[in-house]
Amino acid sequence: MRIAIITGGETGEREVSINSAKNVASAIGFATHETFVFPEDQSKFIESASTFDLVIPMIHGKGAEDGAVQQLCEALGLPFLFSPIDAHKIGIDKVLTKEFVDRAGIKTAKRFSRSSAVFPVFVKPRFGGSSVHTSRIESADALEIFLENVSEEMMIEEAVSGREFTVGVVEQNPGDPEALPVVQIVSQNKFFDYESKYNADHLASEICPARIDRALSRQLQDAAIAAHTLIGASHISRSDFIVTDAGEIYFLEINTIPGLTNSSLVPKMLNTANISFQRLLEKWCRDACAT
């Protein structure tokens, strides 16, 4: 089996994507593989596409988590891991994803326009992840200044406060999603921002498994499985939540290609659940090549 790993991208998540790809490459002892950093290596990948059996897209955010790389693979006749194109297109769009989970009765934060915002608010990219360009804004003046300095489409949401949790979902068997142990995020900053995830001086505490009662853990896991299923995700996803002091669960977002670096959340969840990432990856690859 010969595998192409595609990573890189042109967003603020590029470095995380490359580190995730390195971790994936280190887990592939069952096949030969080659890594392509996009967009620099895109032509090289296309030229050599016929020599590969399978692609592992490892770009977080735009470029793969939006279905772009998957569409390229489909055009080249190459199978790929993780979710189908439509699931990525839904998952990367926070507005569209929340419409799906809203219909399932899962709470989401209220969205505002610039003129209707009730402060404080969170402002985040409609498309994207890793908390890049996400900020808590306290006033209308600060909101206008912030929006003047970003070029991408942004969402303005009520600042729901509470404890932060995240739940990974994996399919050890196709079409049978199971939730991994819940992780509680305790950030040194005001919220679980980019620094809290990747800056060694500001890393959040990631408590795995979360020290919560079994009922809340099951509710969060059920919500993560529901989000995974509703958007049509496959193999793996990770959903983020806030639980208010009143015990209400709010869905924040889903990641259809979650971080897989050494310090990322899903690998920690897999370790806690005694699930071998290497064996899981090998099964996914062999299954994908067999279909």
Image: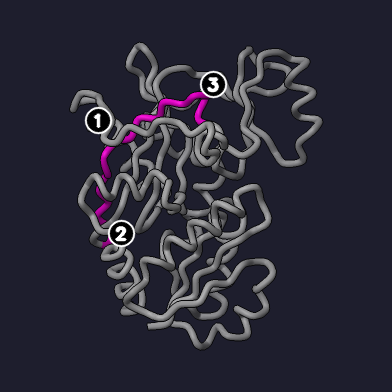
Q: Camera-side residue: 105 or 7?
A: 7
Which is more toward the observer, 224 or 43? Answer: 43
Quarter residue 269 falls in: top left
Question: Image height check: is 125 above or below 80?
Answer: above
Residue 218 visible from this viewpoint:
yes
Q: Residues within 10 Å of mark 1 (few under 14, many from 20)?
A: some
Q: What crowding class fits label 2: few (fewer than 14 Cα within 10 Å), some (14-19), or many (20 or more)?
A: some
What residue is rendered at 20% in x and 51% in y?
274
Disc 3 designates what residue? 190
The type of colouring in the image is one colour
- How far across and how far down the image is residue 200, in percent? 52, 38
Q: Amino acid at mark 3?
A: Lys
Q: Range of the magenta residues?
A: 174-192
Q: Residue furthest front?
A: 201
> Quadrant of residue 54 in the image?
bottom left
- Amino acid carrying label 1: it is Ser
Identify residue type, mark 2.
Phe
- Is residue 287 shown in magenta? no
- Between the residue at mark 3 and the residue at mark 1, the CA separation in whole angstroms equals 24 Å
Q: Is 235 on the left or on the right of 66, as rendered?
A: left
Residue 238: x percent and y percent? 40, 44
Which percent across, then down, holds residue 233? 40, 53
Q: Is residue 256 visible?
A: no
Describe the element under mark 3 as helix, strand or loop.
loop
Q: Which mark is residue 217?
A: 1
x and y percent of residue 28 in the render? 37, 71
Residue at screen point 48% across, 34% down: 203
> In this view of the protein, which residue sits in the foreground, 197 or 236?
197
* Circle nearer the N terminus (3, 1): 3
Compared with 222, 141 (above or below) is: above
